[in-house]
Image: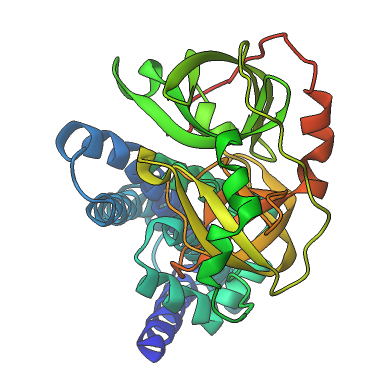
């Protein structure tokens, strides 16, 4: 399939280049401006149409609707604004310099638009599509050449339809690194240290009526970092007006005292919480056995064995898709789901090695966690904090 994609990209760029050659720079600029304006209009209208008529569609269906709206907008914008440029140019063919500039400009702008659309679709596309995008030579070249602002715009488009609500670990068109390690040892999840940590891993519920309706709530996981303090992800509590933790069959009210949407960390103050704080470990080398603890899907407490793939510096998005950030991240060979967000990665001694915050787009056995080195300062700074802070806007 890759050669088909490569051929389609090359043919598309050549067709726009040929069109720019025929029309010249000015007329071509009008045509491309119309195309870009139409795409933006389609991307503005698409989510609103989906919300009105297809809110219960699967993510793939919503994605295809967004792409269709963008393509329809591109055609309409080119027809309307492009016709102005063609009238402005007048009859006859452009001179050679105008033709060359027109062709070059058309190729550059169309490649940029293609790169933004591919980067926006990638986080919500099926894994087979993601692998195809990652292996594309043409899209790789475009991704490396794209300015950072284009990557930010792609992230904003993704947020419009991203049903998972998880931050992107890697922004733009850059593929996820492959870090092969042996399969996890199932016994890790049953080790005495991991079992002893269970009472300090909590379920988080955040009411988000302004996000998705009066009864809507986000579900996540968290771990006790200090007396009456619980660490979770910022995207779990973003936009919430009430937060609670469940522990030992009880529900305790919590307030958010630290909220860092760039790193994706939040710390809660939970008066009356008696669970013991967990100790944090130092850095873990590749192949170290670990366990991922939490409440996947908002269900019961679950511990899954895993293994460290490696520690990486990842350039990704903040939880709103508005800023590109750098994070130190643990890549794990472990399975996690929405609901595991904010839960701890535990070593065999029951020490916290990181905080789960995202999953792979292409591999169900890869989970990403923020390292302690990335989060220690924020967590330690909240150890005695009691002042409630804003949880800002919803993430979806």
Viewer can see residue 18: no
Identify the colour scheme used. Answer: rainbow
Taking the view exactly as shown, the residue that stands out farthest to the left is 53
Residue 380 position, x and y percent, is 82, 30
Q: Pick the quarter of the image with the N terminus.
A: bottom left
Residue 233 position, x and y percent, is 59, 36
Q: Is residue 152 above or below residue 267?
A: below
Q: Residue at x 66, y 42 (%)?
A: 323
Residue 378 position, x and y percent, is 79, 32
In the rendered view, does 60 fall on the left or right side of 389?
A: left
In the rendered view, does 145 fall on the left or right side of 36?
A: right
The image quadrant that residue 183 belongs to is bottom right
Q: Residue at x 45, y 69 (%)?
A: 362
The image quadrant that residue 140 belongs to is bottom right
In the rendered view, does 150 fall on the left or right side of 126?
A: right
Viewer can see residue 129: yes
Q: Residue at x 73, y 73 (%)?
A: 286
Q: Pick the quarter of the image with the C terminus.
A: top left
């Amino acid at each position: 399939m890759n050669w088909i994609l490569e051929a389609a990209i090359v043919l598309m760029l050549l067709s726009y280049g040929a069109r720019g050659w025929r029309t010249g720079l000015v007329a071509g600029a009008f045509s491309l401006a119309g195309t870009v304006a139409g795409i933006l209009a389609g991307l503005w209208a698409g989510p609103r149409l989906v919300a009105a008529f297809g809110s219960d569609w699967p993510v793939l269906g919503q994605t295809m609707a967004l792409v269709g709206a963008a393509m329809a907008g591109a055609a309409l914008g080119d027809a309307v604004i492009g016709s102005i440029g063609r009238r402005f140019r007048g009859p006859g063919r452009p001179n050679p310099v105008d033709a060359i500039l027109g062709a070059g400009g058309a190729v550059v702008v169309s490649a940029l638009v293609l790169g933004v659309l591919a980067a926006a679709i990638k986080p919500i596309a099926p894994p087979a599509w993601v692998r195809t995008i990652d292996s594309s030579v043409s899209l790789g070249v475009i991704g490396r050449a794209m300015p950072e602002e284009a990557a930010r715009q792609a992230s904003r488009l993704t947020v419009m339809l991203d049903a998972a609500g998880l931050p992107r670990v890697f922004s733009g068109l850059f593929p996820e690194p492959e870090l092969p390690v042996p399969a996890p040892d199932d016994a890790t999840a049953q080790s005495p240290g991991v079992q002893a940590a269970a009472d300090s891993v909590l379920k988080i519920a955040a009411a988000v009526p302004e996000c998705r309706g009066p009864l809507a709530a986000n579900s996540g996981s968290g771990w006790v970092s200090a007396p009456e303090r619980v660490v979770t992800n910022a995207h779990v509590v973003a936009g919430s007006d009430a937060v609670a933790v469940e522990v030992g069959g009880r529900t305790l009210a919590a307030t958010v005292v630290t909220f860092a949407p760039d790193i994706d960390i939040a710390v809660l103050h939970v008066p009356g919480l008696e669970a013991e704080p967990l100790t944090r470990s130092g850095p873990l080398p590749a192949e170290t056995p670990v366990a991922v603890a939490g409440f996947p899907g908002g269900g019961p407490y679950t511990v899954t064995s895993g293994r460290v793939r490696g520690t990486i510096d990842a350039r990704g998005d903040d939880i709103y898709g508005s800023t590109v950030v750098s994070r130190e991240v643990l890549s794990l060979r472990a399975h996690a789901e929405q609901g595991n967000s904010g839960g701890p990665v535990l070593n065999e001694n029951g020490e916290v090695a990181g905080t789960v915050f995202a999953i792979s787009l292409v591999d169900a056995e890869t989970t990403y966690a923020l390292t302690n080195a990335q989060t220690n300062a924020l967590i330690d700074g909240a150890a005695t904090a009691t002042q409630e802070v804003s949880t800002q806007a919803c993430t979806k």
